[in-house]
Image (cartoon, rainbow, N blue to C red):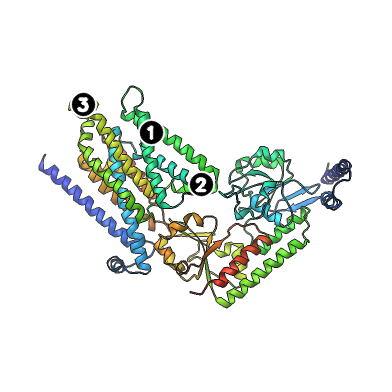
């Protein structure tokens, strides 16, 4: 049996299922939704992912499980996953990390709530048709535990989005494209409004950057060492640099996202008017950092111009419109030192 | 005592003090930021503000002081532990002190969100104390007295239990995992002088106790029966020694995290140099250990092309080969 036969058989099966579903539903569902769903489920699904691997399915998958940040980006692009795994431990107030954006965590199945956690039974019970994650090494899916990978892919094929895209525009568009293939309405007014807000925020940053000439450094400070991020490896800073924002490159860069330096070398970054700190860990060390003299003496720290960098936020127009707008406001209020 | 032996031992003490002074000077002079000796001395004497002063007074002087205190404490604790257990392979962490400190800090972080250095140090101290009391109670339960072997076994068991607990918490979420990493490799960078000041009374008390129990430990080395026949309170010496180890180790670990190999290796060197008398091993071990940790920390700043290497890692890198060489060179010096 060749591929063509398999596909034909699949289409036949899908049509049969669709007919059966229609028969069962008894015509009581909202006609708009039903129309969309049937339109989405009739065609075949084919996607070549960031690793160059192609997943071909006979129908568009409706039960999708994704890494939580990926799921949040798809959600903003109009597609809701059935289950997610990722950083899904709520804080003391019950709020989730910005890394999962607006993902309606309480309405979906949580398969794993931290790195290395993946409940394969819950996953199987969902009867997933597709699993979506980032890839950073071009080979593996980021949050899929290696030791469970074989079992997981036996239940559903995996596709990977590029974890290190060049710009946020590119990253967001890749999510919009995938959401569209999964049946989301990517022409919605909501998405258009989010994109307009995103473009407007970037335009504001461009204005502020050229008017103020501010220099920005991106850091993840710890008490033992200072980690300086290289903007060349971060899509949001490639995007911001293209808008004319002056983002410092680590002195003597080593080709890594973060250059780890001694606190003795902190003064190499005293030209920074604004320091953006990794929001994933800054709150925990903020107090202790004030006891590090070479941190406390940095001009940007003295001027109180230290703001959050929302590292690893979901790539969506909605999230980045907020992130860039917050940054635009902060930069507008910061002064050149 | 033969005069030649006395002269040799005096020379040994003078030498270790000289090494210590050299270590401190190097620690102030050497770092990732190249500063001339003149700049360093000026920053030390004149003070003021500016980048050089931040580095010399803020970073280098502080980490030197922390390394001195932590090093001395671990050297003394190691000597005490090896004498107490009469086991030359005993590590000061054997009473479960390090594990207790780590478990308390990680608990505080996970369930109460305690992240700043000062309360964490208090937690570490309390955890160390509770762990050593538990070990002592477990080790002395039943009919027999708390013999060295029983204490060591109870300590090893509690350490295993506590580290399983810590790992379980670390696996539960990313933030705790990050916090736990500090408890894998110790460091003396930016620990904060206020933290050291709080730890200091515990360290001083621990050292005083260590010096007091020294002669008693000498007698204990003759065997339990011999020392009893000499009229010494074996139990009292053991308890005081355990208290001293807990104070020294607990405070040192609370300040810097776990620093390995120091308490294991240095007492061996000390015994090889100054003989088997605890009254000499303890002070000599303190001086040598302090110098060793300061040097390890200084070397860790410049040895790699990339980031600094933590003092806790450097002591293992440097101490491991020294330890193996000692073991291979001669019959293990009896503790």
- Residues marked 2 and 1, same chain: yes
The CA span between labels 2 and 3 is 49 Å
Foreground mark, 2 or 1?
1
Residue A113, given in percent of the width and then of the height, sits at 61, 45
Residue B89, given in percent of the width and then of the height, sits at 33, 36
Q: Chain of mark 3?
A: B
**Residue at x-position 35% and y-position 62%:** B58
- Residues marked 1 and 3, same chain: yes
In the picture of the structure, the residue carrying the numbered disc 2 is B177
Q: Which mark is residue A255?
A: none
The CA span between labels 2 and 1 is 26 Å
Q: Kindly state the secondary structure of the residue where label 2 is placed.
A: helix
In the picture of the structure, the residue carrying the numbered disc 1 is B134
Residue A23's image quarter?
top right
Residue B21, given in percent of the width and then of the height, sits at 25, 56
Classify A131 as above or below B84.
below
Q: Kindly state the secondary structure of the residue where label 3 is placed.
A: helix
Marks 1 and 3, the one that precedes in the sequence: 1
Evaluate whether residue B326 shows in this view: no
Dot 2 and dot 3 residues touching (CB under 8 Å): no
Question: Callout 2: few (<14), some (14-19), or many (20+) C-alpha neighbours within 10 Å?
Answer: some
Q: Kindly state the secondary structure of the residue where label 1 is placed.
A: helix
């Amino acid at each position: 049996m060749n591929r063509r036969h398999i596909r034909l058989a699949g289409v036949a099966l899908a049509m049969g299922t669709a007919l059966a579903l229609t028969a069962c539903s008894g015509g009581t569902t909202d006609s708009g939704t039903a129309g969309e769903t049937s339109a989405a489920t009739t065609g075949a699904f084919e996607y070549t992912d960031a690793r160059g691997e192609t997943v071909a399915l006979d129908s568009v998958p409706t039960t999708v499980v994704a890494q939580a940040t990926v799921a949040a980006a798809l959600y903003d692009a109009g597609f809701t996953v059935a289950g997610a795994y990722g950083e899904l431990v709520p804080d003391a107030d019950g709020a989730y990390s910005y890394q999962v954006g607006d993902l309606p965590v309480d309405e979906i199945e949580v398969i794993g709530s931290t790195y290395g956690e993946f409940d394969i039974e819950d996953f199987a019970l969902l009867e997933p048709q597709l699993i979506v994650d980032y890839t950073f090494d071009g080979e593996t899916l980021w949050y899929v535990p290696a030791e469970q990978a074989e079992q997981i892919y036996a239940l559903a094929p995996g596709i990977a989005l590029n974890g290190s895209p060049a710009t946020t525009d590119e990253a967001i568009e890749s999510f919009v494209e995938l959401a569209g293939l999964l049946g989301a309405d990517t022409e919605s007014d909501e998405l258009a409004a989010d994109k307009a807000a995103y473009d407007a925020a970037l335009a504001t940053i461009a204005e502020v950057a050229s008017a103020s000439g501010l220099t920005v450094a991106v850091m993840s400070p710890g008490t033992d060492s200072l980690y300086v991020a290289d903007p060349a490896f971060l899509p949001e800073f490639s995007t911001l640099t293209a808008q004319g924002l002056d983002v410092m490159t680590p002195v003597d860069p080593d080709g890594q996202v973060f250059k780890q330096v001694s606190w003795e070398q902190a003064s190499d970054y005293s030209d920074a008017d604004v320091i953006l700190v990794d929001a994933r860990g800054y709150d925990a060390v903020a107090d202790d950092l004030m006891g590090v003299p070479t941190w406390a003496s940095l001009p940007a720290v003295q001027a109180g111009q230290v703001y959050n960098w929302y590292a690893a936020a979901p790539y969506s127009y909605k999230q980045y419109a907020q992130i860039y707008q917050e940054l635009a406001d902060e930069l507008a209020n910061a002064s050149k030192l | 005592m033969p005069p030649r032996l006395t002269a040799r031992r005096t020379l040994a003490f003078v030498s270790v003090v000289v090494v210590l002074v050299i270590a401190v000077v190097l620690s102030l002079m050497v770092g990732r930021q190249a500063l001339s000796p003149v700049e360093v001395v000026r920053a030390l004497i004149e003070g003021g503000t500016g980048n050089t002063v931040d580095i010399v007074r803020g970073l280098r002087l502080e980490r030197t002081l922390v390394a001195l205190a932590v090093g001395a404490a671990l050297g003394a604790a190691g000597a005490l532990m090896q004498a107490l257990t009469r086991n030359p392979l005993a590590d000061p962490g054997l009473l479960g002190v390090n594990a207790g400190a780590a478990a308390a800090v990680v608990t505080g972080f996970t369930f109460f969100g305690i992240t700043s250095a000062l309360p964490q140090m208090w937690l570490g101290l309390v955890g160390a104390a509770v762990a050593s009391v538990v070990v002592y109670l477990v080790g002395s339960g039943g009919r027999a007295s708390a013999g060295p072997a029983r204490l060591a076994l109870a300590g090893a068991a509690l350490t295993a239990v506590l580290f399983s607990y810590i790992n379980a918490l670390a696996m539960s979420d990313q933030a705790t995992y990050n916090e736990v990493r500090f408890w894998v490799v110790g460091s003396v960078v930016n620990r904060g002088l206020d933290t050291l000041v709080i730890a200091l009374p515990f360290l001083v008390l621990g050292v005083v106790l260590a010096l007091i129990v020294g002669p008693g430990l000498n007698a204990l080395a003759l065997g339990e029966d011999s020392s009893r026949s000499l009229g010494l309170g074996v139990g009292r010496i053991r308890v005081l020694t355990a208290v001293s180890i807990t104070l020294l180790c607990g405070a040192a670990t609370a300040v810097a995290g776990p620093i390995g190999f120091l308490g294991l290796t240095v007492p061996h060197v000390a015994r090889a140099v100054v003989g088997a008398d605890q009254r000499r091993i303890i002070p000599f071990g303190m001086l040598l250990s302090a110098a060793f940790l300061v040097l390890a920390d200084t070397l860790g700043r410049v040895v790699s092309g990339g980031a600094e290497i933590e003092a806790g890692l450097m002591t293992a890198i440097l101490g491991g080969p020294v330890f193996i060489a000692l073991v291979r060179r001669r019959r293990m010096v009896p503790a």
